[in-house]
């Protein structure tokens, strides 16, 4: 083999997305069922608790370890959830083929993302089972999908699961804001960018109540949004759950999506637009305000 070929192979080995590098992992999802079946076959509480630790916690992936960090008593919480909601876990286990299919498809879409945005920083996605509190979150370059929350919605199919996976993967690429000072506009564009880019990458539309409501009441939502966009009332607009103060939950995602979509549609260079959407400095409110102005979005 020539020296040139040797150097070329060495270079390819260290490319971020070279070869068959794995970016999506489901070992925690698989280990959970092994643990659950074992625990349910045991009657002694101390042995059940040992099973939770030995078969799930001790075998945790880097993603599950990140989820568990700074949380206490998780073994007791998992055991209580397993014993209190047997039918829920039965129904979730039946969705195993959906997870398996989504892992492969998400790997493919991450590759597509890298084609659209060559500067993509390597990150990992983990399908984990948490304590029924959080669907998607990010820890540094680790994207965590709590499938026991995401799949509790019967409308979540493999398309939406893949799209959600890309949404969280985009978060691993973004500049982090100061979450103590973040305002509604910044929160909304940050989440909306992930929703919009997940659509650009996968071609899968966002199927969520906030999109359905926003599309039919866009002007009214925008007028309401403008009153609070420079405040820290983030709970009114992003990850709100059911908030009686607003006609639909999470409308900030919709507004952010439309701002990003308007910016992208105006751009002549789409790859450059994607790069700017990924690299917007969310720690700089002036940069976020400037992005809104340049987008030209006006609620129509």
Image (cartoon, rainbow, N blue to C red):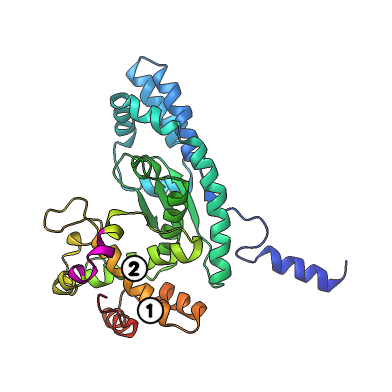
- CB contact under 8 Å: marks 2 and 1: no
Relative side of 164 to 103, left or right: left
Helix, strand or loop at label 1? It is helix
Q: Position of residue 137 (x, y in %)?
A: 36, 54
- The earlier-in-sequence mark between 2 and 1 is 2
Work out which quarter of the rendered image holds the C terminus and state it. bottom left
Q: Which residue shows up at 30% across the image and 69% down it?
A: 256
Q: Which mark is residue 54?
A: none
Q: Position of residue 121 (x, y in %)?
A: 52, 67
* Residue range highlighted in magenta: 213-221
Residue reaching furthest right? Answer: 1
Is 52 above or below relative to 257?
above
Q: Which mark is residue 257?
A: 2
The one of 219 and 60 positioned closer to us in this rendering: 219
Residue 112 visible (yes or no): yes
The one of 159 and 1 positioned closer to us in this rendering: 159
* Residue 189 lies in the magenta stretch: no
Is 182 above or below relative to 164?
below
Residue 59 visible (yes or no): no
Q: Which residue shows up at 28% across the image and 25% down it?
A: 84
Q: What is the quadrant of residue 173 in the picture?
A: bottom left
* Residue labelled with disc 1: 263
Is 189 above or below relative to 238?
below
Residue reaching furthest left? Answer: 245
């Amino acid at each position: 083999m020539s020296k040139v070929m040797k150097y070329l192979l060495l270079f390819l080995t260290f490319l971020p997305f070279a070869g068959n590098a794995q970016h999506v992992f489901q070992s925690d999802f698989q280990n959970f069922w092994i643990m659950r079946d074992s625990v349910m076959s045991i009657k002694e509480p101390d042995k059940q608790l040992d099973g939770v630790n030995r078969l799930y916690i001790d075998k945790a992936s880097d993603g599950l370890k990140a989820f568990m960090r700074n949380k206490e008593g998780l073994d007791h919480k998992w055991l209580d959830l397993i014993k209190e909601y047997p039918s829920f876990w039965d129904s979730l286990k039946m969705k195993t083929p959906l997870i398996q299919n989504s892992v492969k498809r998400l790997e493919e879409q991450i590759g597509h993302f890298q084609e659209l945005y060559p500067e993509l920083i390597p990150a990992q996605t983990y399908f984990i089972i948490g304590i029924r509190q959080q669907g998607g979150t990010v820890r540094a370059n680790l994207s965590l999908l709590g499938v026991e929350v995401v799949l509790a919605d019967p409308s979540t199919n493999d398309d939406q699961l893949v799209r959600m996976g890309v949404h969280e993967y985009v978060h691993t690429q973004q500049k982090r804001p100061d979450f103590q000072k973040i305002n509604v506009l910044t929160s909304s564009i940050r989440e909306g960018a992930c929703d919009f880019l997940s659509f650009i990458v996968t071609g899968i539309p966002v199927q969520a109540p906030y999109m359905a409501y926003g599309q039919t009441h866009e002007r009214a939502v925008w007028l309401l949004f403008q009153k609070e966009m420079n405040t820290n009332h983030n709970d009114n607009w992003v990850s709100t759950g059911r908030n009686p103060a607003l006609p639909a939950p999470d409308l900030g995602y919709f507004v952010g999506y439309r701002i990003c979509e308007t910016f992208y549609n105006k751009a002549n260079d789409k790859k450059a637009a994607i790069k700017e959407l990924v690299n917007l400095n969310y720690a700089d409110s002036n940069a976020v305000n400037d992005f809104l102005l340049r987008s030209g979005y006006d609620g129509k």
